[in-house]
Image: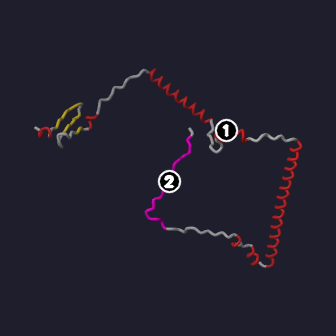
Amino acid sequence: MFKLFSNLVINQNVLGTVRNISSCNGPLFFRASIPMFAEPLKKKKRLDPQILKAREDRKRKKVEKAIKRLEKVSKTLKPIDEIQLMAALNNEIGNRQRPPIDINNEKLEERIRTLKMWSKYKHDEHIFNLQVLSDLEYSQQRALNELREISEELYQAAIQIDESLLPYTLEGPVETPPIENYESPDGEYTDISKKWD
């Protein structure tokens, strides 16, 4: 009797498809073919056109509301942590502020005079430096011209750049062969920047 059930094959014809249940590999090893898992399609309900229109209106209003909310948020500026005042300092702001200084006209005029004198001094200093540079350049060019009249070889030697004036040396790795079995870093990083919507 057990042998009979182990080789049992049941065939059914439902909706034009064949469904097989077999226990060939053992009495407890049942397999169902794929069509067994299907279910009949649900009938589509016909909805009232007014209900469909109301749903579309609700969706449209929701999108418009979200757009308005985003427009309001876009006007607010992002806070900058470096500019924001710490809470501890904000509490002490009364103690940290200096009292306003009343400056009388005499003191104000003295400051203006000092500022004008300082501006004139710095202007004169700048003009003097420009004049010294111009004189040095003129003297150098005149000396080179006289040297050229005497000897072209000495002139060419004089206009060469002196490498010893700029002692700049570079020492670094030269071209190296690739490292075997080297796995380059994948470039992952943790983004800790704040997100503002």
Name the residue tied to disc 2: 187
In the picture, residue 163 is in which quadrant?
Answer: bottom right
Residue farthest toward the left in the current orientation of the protein: 1
Q: In this view, does 53 lie to the left or right of 117?
A: left
x and y, in percent, of residue 124 in the image: 85, 57
Q: Which residue is rendered at x = 12% and y = 39% of the image?
A: 2
**Is 1 placed left or right of 166 in the picture?**
left
The quadrant where residue 42 appears: top left
| Quadrant that contains the N terminus | top left
- The C terminus lies in which quarter of the figure? top right
Q: Identify whether 81 is placed above or below 145.
A: above
Please state which of residues 63 and 46 is positioned toward the viewer in this rendering.
Answer: 63
Residue in view at x 29 percent, y 31 percent: 39
Given residues 69 and 10, the one toward you in this image is 69
Residue at screen point 45% across, 61% down: 182
Name the secondary structure under disc 1: helix
Q: Which comes sooner in the sequence, label 2 or label 1?
A: 1
For label 1, the residue is 91
Q: Give the range drawn in magenta.
A: 177-195
Query: Which disc number belongs to residue 170?
Result: none
**Could you tell me the amino acid type at mark 1?**
Asn
Q: How crowded is mark 2: few (under 14 residues within 10 Å), some or many (20 or more)?
A: few
